[in-house]
Amino acid sequence: MAKERFKVVPAVYAILMKNEEILLLRRYNTGYQDGNYSFPAGHLDGNETLRQAIVREAKEEVDVDIKIDDLELVHIMHRKADDHERIDFYYMVEIWQGEPKIMEPEKCDELKWVAKDNLPNNLALEVKPAIENIFTNKSIYSDFGF
């Protein structure tokens, strides 16, 4: 009998950046870190690449169109949660079409541009160390929650 393999949940994050500011959205009514800021993000739906997933999520959450070739993978985080583990892929996006706006008001109650060195205190738990690793440490990989 074959042993069942360990599984992780992949997630993707879009770091939209313009004029040294990053776009953050405040989570609302999701049941996970509500009231905290994060990036447009989500999970793979299956039968799609990581880059296809972040293009889809950015469109669904903030109504911007991103070309796959305009994505730059800047960080990977192996994250442990209570009962599972995740691999988070952070993509820098400096070129897109459209003006970001809230597309899921049942899950997000605010969008705002913030200076990367003047972030709000209420960042999602995994987002703060990811930002530090991306902009300060210049590290492609980190782990969190172990």
Image: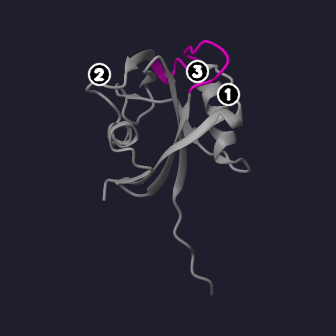
Above or below for 33 versus 6: above
Upstream in sequence: badge 1 or badge 2: 1
- Label 2 sits on a secondary structure element that is loop
Question: Which quadrant holds the C terminus?
Answer: bottom left
Which of 129 and 116 lies nearest the eye of the viewer?
116
Residue at 43% of width from left, 26% of height from top? 29
In the rendering, which numbered label is found on residue 52?
none
- Residue at the spot of label 3: 62
Whole-percent x, y for residue 66 in the image: 67, 28
Upstream in sequence: badge 2 or badge 3: 3
Which of 57 and 16 lies nearest the eye of the viewer?
16
- Label 1 sits on a secondary structure element that is loop
Q: Nearer the viewer, mark 3 or mark 1?
A: 1
The answer to whether the residue labelled 1 contacts the one labelled 2, judged by CB atoms less than 8 Å apart, is no
Residue at 43% of width from left, 15% of height from top? 112
Residue at 69% of width from left, 23% of height from top? 65
Above or below for 107 versus 69: above
Which of 16 and 54 lies nearest the eye of the viewer?
16
- Residue at the spot of label 1: 66
Span colored in magenta:
94-109
- Residue 80: tell me if it is visible: no
Magenta region includes residue 22: no
- Residue at the spot of label 2: 118
- Residue 122: tell me if it is visible: yes
Q: Residues within 10 Å of mark 3 (few under 14, many from 20)?
A: many
Q: What distance separates the C-alpha of mark 2 from that of mark 3?
A: 22 Å
The answer to whether the residue labelled 2 contacts the one labelled 3, judged by CB atoms less than 8 Å apart, is no
Whole-percent x, y for residue 93 in the image: 57, 30
Question: Which quadrant holds the N terminus?
Answer: bottom right
Magenta region includes residue 108: yes
| 136 lies left or right of 60 | left
| 72 lies left or right of 56 | left
